[in-house]
Amino acid sequence: MELQYDEYGAGNPHRLHAHLFAKGLAASGLDSEYGAYLDEAPLEVLMQNNVMSLFGLNRRLRAASLGFHAAFEATSSAPSRKIARGLQRLDFPPEMVEYYTEHVEADSVHEQLAVRTMCGTLIEEEPEQHANVWFGAWAYLHVEDLYGERMLTEWSA
Amino acid sequence: MNQQAPDEHPDVILCPDGPMLLRGEHVIEDEDGKEHSTTRPVSAVCRCGASGIKPWCDGTHKTMRKRPGR
Ligand code: FES
């Protein structure tokens, strides 16, 4: 709950994370409408989203959903710092950079909350869900890996 | 002092080899005497000393050697 509240800007609409991203896109001269670039998104990105929804929409997969989320948060702050630095180097507007610097700090907290208070509590209460948490975490790392491979191949082509 | 039931949410959580989580609003004074107010429902304060955004944790502790015996 605390994590979600933070994503929603802790009550400050200007700090809403989705809003920060939209502001960054607009400042970069990109379309900030929902789904604007859907047809251009590599299939690996859509796959990530589908796996996330699949876990989230099925109660029997709720532990996998938490594992997926924790793995995401736990691998987010360091890359966010690198992305922010890269965007700065490429002269992207400060609004776009800000989205990523915010996540360096925010996701260091979210990682701890997701792993400890969410996955940890679930496993304590329902130890039989242990393997499913790992299943979700590995599923996340797998789809993220596929996306990374795809981008690196395209960039080096 | 209020007796806290053990199942209540603690205000301060020390993460092993990681940051200190603070629930609620706090003002932190850093090594240079500068004050920083928390802005989140939960904040992570760097305990490893290697963060690039001190006093907050930025995840750098994960790249450091673990304490022996862990
Ligand atoms: S405790 Fe996380 S960066 Fe220092």
Image (spheres, rainbow, N blue to C red):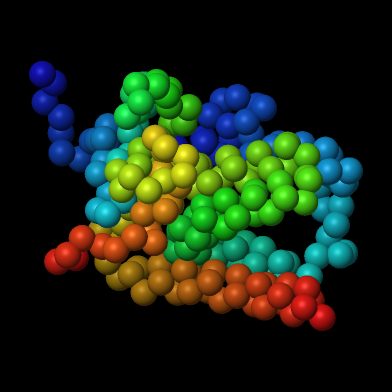
Q: Which of A17 and A87 is in front in this view?
A: A87
Q: Where is residue A42 in the image (x, y as percent from the top left)?
A: 78, 70
Quadrant assignment, res A99: top right
> Where A67 sits versus B13, above or below?
below
Q: Position of residue B14 (x, y in %)?
A: 25, 44
The answer to whether residue A133 shows anywhere in this view is yes
Indicate the quadrant where residue A56 lies. bottom right
Picture residue at 34% right of the left edge, 21% below the top: B33
Q: Where is residue A84 shown, x and y percent of the image?
A: 65, 49
Q: Is any part of residue A3 visible from this angle?
A: no
| Position of A53 relative to B26 (above/below) | below
Q: Considering depth in this image, is A72 or B18 the residue closer to the camera?
A: B18
Q: Nearer the viewer, residue A145 or A51?
A: A145
Residue at the location (54% across, 69% down)? A140
Residue A113 locus on image (x, y percent): 39, 47
Dividing the image into 4 quarters, which one contains the N terminus of chain A?
Answer: top left
